[in-house]
Image (cartoon, grey):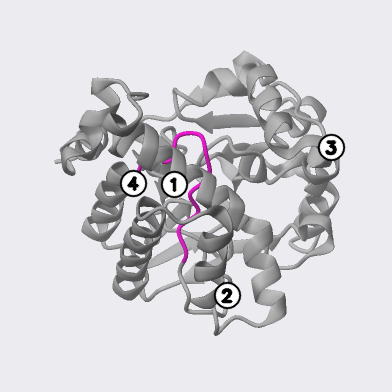
Amino acid sequence: MSVPELLDLRHLGLERSIGCYLLETADGPALQDCGPTTCVPELKAGLAEHGLELTDVRHLLLSHIHLDHAGAAGAIVRAHPRIQVHVSAIGAPHLVDPSRLEASARRLYGSAFDELWGELAPVPEENVHIVEREAVGLECFPSPGHASHHVCFVHEDGTLYAGDAAGVRIAPSRLVLPPTPPPDIDVAAWYATIDELERRAPKRLALVHFGVFDDIGRHLGELRDRLGEWEQIVEDGATQDEFVERVHAGLGELDDDDLEAVERAMPMWQSYAGLKRWVEKVKNPGRDGASSPERAGRVRGKDAGSARIREYGRD
C-alpha cells in the first residue's frame, strides 16, 4: 500500500469535498478520519478499490470530532467491534456519548442534519484510546485553532495528516482557505499551530478537504495570511453577507465545481459565525463583557497556543 492513499467519500455525490486517508501502521491498515455516516457506502467502495473491506481496518486516527471527519466512527465500530479509535482527550467523551455533540449540530444544521450526516452512534469506551505522543507508530501532537481538541498525525514517510489544521485546499487549486466554524475557533492558537507545522518541516501535507500537497512553505504562509485577512474583515464590522461577498471575490481562480466543493467543505456562513464569535467573545471581550479573563488571555500573543503544544513534550 502506498502512503498516503486519499479516498474520496463523495459527500452527497460531490467529488473532492470530504475525504479520508488509508495508511499502513505498525498494527495494520488504518483510516485517518472516516467521514460522516452518510459516506460509509463510498468509504467501503474506496477500500474495495484497494482490495480491502472495513473488516480489514484496525484503527481510526481522528484529527477531531467534527461530523465531516468523525461522524461515522460509532457506526463503523458497531459493525466492526475490533476497530480501535484514537482521539484527543477532549474529544473522547463526545465519541462515547455523542448526545451533546448531536444536539449542538442539530441546532446548527436544522432539518438538513440527517441528510448531511446521518446517524451519530456512540463508540464503546473500550474502543477509545486517548492520543498522546504516539499512536500505532505515528507521531501525534495537538494542533488547536480550528478546534480546541484538534490533533495531527505524522507518518515516518514524512506525511503530516493535518485534518483541518492546515486549512482547506481543493486539489489541484493552489488556493488555501481557513475553515473557522463555531463554537471554539481560536485564531491565536491557530497561529501557533501553523508555526508548529512549519517547525516540523514535513515532506507533504495530507488534507481531508482535499488533497496532498508538498509546497509546504507557500501553503502555510497563505493560510496564515488569509486567516488574518478574514479575521480583520469581521473585526471591522462586516455583516455575514458582506463577509461572504468579499471572500467569494477573492476566490476568482476557482471554477464552479471547485467553489461548490469549498462551500460543502467549509460553508462561508459558518466561517463568518465562528470568526464573529471569536472577535466578540474572546478577542475583544470588553465590547460586550461576554468572555472570561482566561479566554481573553489567549489573544495576547502566541504563548497560550504554544503552551498547549508544548504540553505534549516537544523539545
Q: Earlier in the sequence, mark 2 or mark 3?
A: 3
Q: Is residue 152 above or below residue 94?
A: below
Residue that label 3 marks: 111
Decide if residue 121 is on the left or right side of residue 4. Answer: right
Quarter of the rendering occupied by the C terminus:
top left
Write down the region rendered in magenta: 177-186
Residue 103 seen in the current view: yes
Rendered image quadrant of residue 145: top left
Marks 4,1: beta carbons within 8 A: yes
Q: Earlier in the sequence, mark 3 or mark 1?
A: 3
Residue that label 2 marks: 171
Distance from label 4 to label 1 (Cα)? 8 Å
Question: Dot 3, crowdedness within 10 Å: few (<14), some or many (≥20)?
Answer: few
Decide if residue 110 is on the left or right side of residue 279. Answer: right
243 drawn magenta? no
Rendered image quadrant of residue 288: top left
Residue type (three-letter) at the residue carrying disc 4: Val
